[in-house]
Image (cartoon, helix red, strand yellow):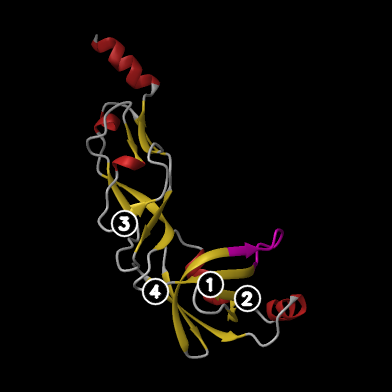
Amino acid sequence: MQTFDIKGTKRVANGKKAAKALRANGQVPCIIYGGKEPVEFAVPESSFRNLIYTPNVYIVNVDIDGVVKKAILKDIQFHPVTEKILHVDFFEIFDDKPVAIAVPVKLVGNSEGVKAGGKLQLEMRKLSIKGLPSKLLDVLEIDVTNLGLGKVIKVGELKYEGIEILNAKAAVVVAVKLTRAAIAAQGEAK
């Protein structure tokens, strides 16, 4: 899995006034939890551009005054009008403990159903997975080559080494829908 580095400084003062002062200086208040104790820190707002505004999922190396912790991005709060980042939560991860994370789905191959006039429809853009950090994937690739007209791939049919998919087993991930043209072509073939 890809990594991303962020440098921050430990926060001295906490509360609304301190957070407002940080934001006025171009800093974003953050917290990292999941380890022994939660740590509150601040990071320059510009550091988040390539982490947040991308479809990629990263393991984040958070450097707080020289102490580096591995984490995943857990939650982001945005201002409702300006959409500026107000607060970021990180969850500390360890190499020997499984972690749950949402990962994007990528479709691979040309579907038989699409060749026959159907429409390929991705129902779930992300899937929640659980596994050790060393086993986590950047994207979940799904081969749709043998997917025919009117057929679907469900979560229960997907298997990846060392990873458990947390979504409902009966949930449809990708389907080939019948289009009017495909229905008409089937009618003419009879």
For the residues labelled 2 and 3, the Cα–Cα distance comes to 33 Å
Q: Are marks 4 and 3 in contact (CB under 8 Å)?
A: no
Magenta span contains residue 88? no
Q: Which residue is mark 3?
A: 163
Residue that mark 1 sits on? 48
Q: Residue at x 30, y 51 (%)?
A: 141
Residue 138 locus on image (x, y percent): 35, 61
Say which amino acid is labelled 4: Phe
What is the quadrant of residue 174 in the picture? top left
Which residue appears at 75% of the width and 75% of the height? 16
Question: Residue lying farthest left?
Answer: 146
**Label 4: few (<14), some (14–19) or many (≥20) C-alpha neighbours in 10 Å:** some
Q: Amino acid at mark 1?
A: Phe
Please say if the residues under marks 4 and 1 sit with CB atoms less than 8 Å apart: no
Task: Please report whichever mark, 4 or 1, sits nearer to the chain's N-terminal start.
Answer: 1
Answer left or right for 102 relative to 96.
right
| Gap in angstroms between the C-alphas marked 3 and 1 | 28 Å
Height in image: 84 above or below 145?
A: below
Q: State the extent of the magenta-drawn residues as a range.
A: 76-85
Q: Residues within 10 Å of mark 2 (few under 14, many from 20)?
A: many
User: Between marks 2 and 1, how big is the CA–CA gap?
Assistant: 9 Å
Precedes in sequence: disc 3 or disc 1: 1
> Is residue 67 in view from this perspective?
yes
Q: Are marks 3 and 1 in contact (CB under 8 Å)?
A: no
Secondary structure type for disc 2: strand
Mark 2 highlights which residue?
28
Residue behind mark 4: 94
> 121 above or below 40?
above
- Give SS at disc 4: loop
